[in-house]
Image (cartoon, rainbow, N blue to C red):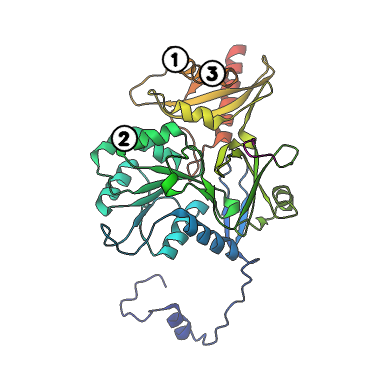
Amino acid sequence: MGERDTQGKFRHWTSIRNISGATRYRRAKVDPANDLAFLVYLSGTTGKPKGVMLTHRNIVANTLQITAGEGPISGQPREGLPEGDSVLAFLPFFHIYGLTVILHQSFYRGVKTVVMSKFDIESWCRIVQEHKITFAYVVPPVVLQLSKHPCVDKYDLSSIRMLNSGAAPLTRELVNAVYSRIKVPVKQGYGLSETSPTTHTQPWEDWERSIGSVGTMLPNQTAKYVSAEEKEVPTGEVGELWIKGPNVFKGYLNNPEGTKNALTEDGFFKTGDVGYQDKDGIFFITDRVKELIKYKGFQVPPAELEGLLVSNPHIDDVAVLGVYKEDQATEVPLAYVKLRQGLTPSPQLEKEIMDWLASRVAHHKRLRGGVRFTEEIPKSASGKILRRMLKVKFLEEEEGKGRKAKL
């Protein structure tokens, strides 16, 4: 059609059907448990993105799971909120985080949702102030900006009752920095594209008690942590998280081998994320199995080092990855650092950052690969660090050093 209907002929899609002469309409038969509703793609942080097949049952189940566990968000008027809650959305709806957690859940709850066409921190703060936003789903880079960006102090953000962060781990230091600055609590959730996405979230009333965790499991799921030998580990021990429930995906598009490797015969999804559960049933995620840096038999989680480094006053953003050093015959942690505005990279500053971290971590977690300065940390639309791009950058830099040495 393409043009505005100035005469108001088309009030419903059935009007188009009737005018077109297609008087017979046969409702499509849908099998909610097996028919594909959405095809979403992974971020491709470590490799080529996979197409995740999600059914109608997956999306409906997860929308209800989130609603049951998310907390007191409502579109109903109440004291102090005549229009009910309002949600600010900037995450893309083609990504599973925006699709289910914001779009489907907000519609289901009947909550007013203000959508940004493009994110920048000043516009975000301005919209919060203008629309009296009470709740927002964010990602760690936004939490980082709320803790450090100078524009934040110009706006009244007191209407926000809670922020929920997902897509990557948050540290206690960063959550505390935001709360100290703007007095807004930040809780954390956890999920994956393959689980539609949300599986865990921190309860509103416990956000402070369980800082650093991803909270408790949402209803109607089973979870366990397993060892490298795929044996379930006891409470408190570290392992890979496996999850089972009606929100677990059908499989990867045109990738039977990937599907077989990800799903067990009894329906558990192998998340690839490492963590543990404490005695109170609170879950912790420390890092991705594929991203753990293996230094001389020790496992070093990059996210832990990144969480500490972003609290350094010189650092605006950071990414840590493992690089192989032939002279040490092992992987070592290396940090790519984006400095705060006004600072100039120097060998002295590199040493200062390395020494600063060394005083705060165990011996095997030091930055033995060094610090490299960069203008930007590459990230996906959902805020995940694209380490594969940094590894390519590292290899290109090393190749350039080799060419210079030969000259």
- Residue 281 appears at what percent x and percent y? 57, 45
- Answer yes or no: do the residues labelled 3 and 1 have beta carbons within 8 Å? no
**Residue 138 visible in image:** no
Q: Which residue matches tag 3?
A: 370
In terms of image quadrants, where is residue 296?
top right
Q: Amino acid at mark 1?
A: Glu
Q: Amino acid at mark 2?
A: Arg
Q: Which residue matches tag 1?
A: 352
Q: Residue at x 53, y 32 (%)?
A: 303
- Pick the residue in front: 296 or 338: 296
- Residue 118 appears at what percent x and percent y? 38, 48
Q: Which residues are magenta?
A: 233-238
Q: Main secondary structure of the magenta part?
A: loop
* First reached walking from the N terminus: tag 1 or tag 2: 2
Q: Which residue matches tag 2?
A: 181
Q: Secondary structure at mark 3?
A: loop
